[in-house]
Image (cartoon, coloured by chain):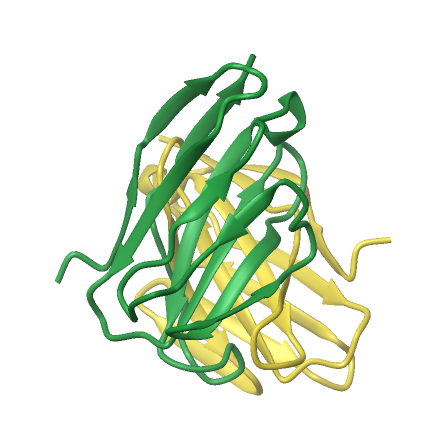
Amino acid sequence: KNEVEQSPQNLTAQEGEFITINCSYSVGISALHWLQQHPGGGIVSLFMLSSGKKKHGRLIATINIQEKHSSLHITASHPRDSAVYICAATSNDYKLSFGAGTTVTVRA
Amino acid sequence: NAGVTQTPKFRILKIGQSMTLQCAQDMNHNYMYWYRQDPGMGLKLIYYSVGAGITDKGEVPNGYNVSRSTTEDFPLRLELAAPSQTSVYFCASSYGEMRGNTIYFGEGSWLTVV
């Protein structure tokens, strides 16, 4: 069993809809990263958080350390948000445990 | 700043051949990493380095070697390529440890071993 589990695996939304991606982890962590990967492209860091909530534009990330759960929300989704979203958890200084990713497709 | 630069972007290797994937960063980051990404799987750490002259194995180091002679460069060497090494490879860097620092990724290198 992977240390980091994401759900759903795939998600299709209509433009403007609110999207939620969930991430659960089975080990104690010190920080969690949310990453975005566009088709055929590189990987970009969206958030790094160890508690509470962070917001950047239409993206919101939350984490509940006690429940070992994090969520990434996309408000007013747009076709350019179509990408794979990956969560990754770290419990030490160098190792990230990655989820398998959630493929998000936003239709116009 | 260019960030993290990887070359080549695409490469086809024959079984048994060797090659080096180049990675350079211009952000003066101490930590550098090599990951591989296989379909439907999370990224796996191959090797990492916490500074020039220091390297260590990650989760899947077999068949690979690295060196870190400078802060900027972290090449990944594939010796005797095997079909199991067909994957997408990502180099990454961070200023410090993962729990307090953003990680920056290169654009990826698509490698096929035939």
Q: Quadrant of the C terminus of chain A?
A: top left
User: Which residue: 52% across, 64% down?
Assistant: B48
Count of residue discs:
0
Chain rendered yellow: A
Q: Nearer the viewer, residue A9 or B54?
A: B54
Q: Does residue A44 appear to the left or right of B55 in the view shown?
A: left
Give residue A43's position: percent from left, percent from top: 40, 50
Using the rendered view, name the quadrant where residue A24 is placed.
bottom right
Using the rendered view, name the quadrant where residue A15 is placed.
top left
Give residue A10's position: percent from left, percent from top: 62, 37
Give residue A5's position: percent from left, percent from top: 74, 56
User: Which residue: 12% across, 62% down?
Assistant: B1
User: Which residue: 16% across, 56% down?
Assistant: B2
User: Which residue: 50% across, 71% down?
Assistant: A61
Q: Residue furthest right?
A: A1
Above or below B99: residue B21:
above
Q: Nearer the viewer, residue A45 or B108?
A: B108
Q: Is residue B31 visible?
A: yes
Chain rendered green: B
Above or below A30: residue A108:
above
Give residue B24's position: percent from left, percent from top: 27, 56
Q: Nearer the viewer, residue A32 or A11?
A: A32
Q: Does residue B114 appear to the left or right of A1 in the view shown?
A: left
Above or below A46: residue B85:
above
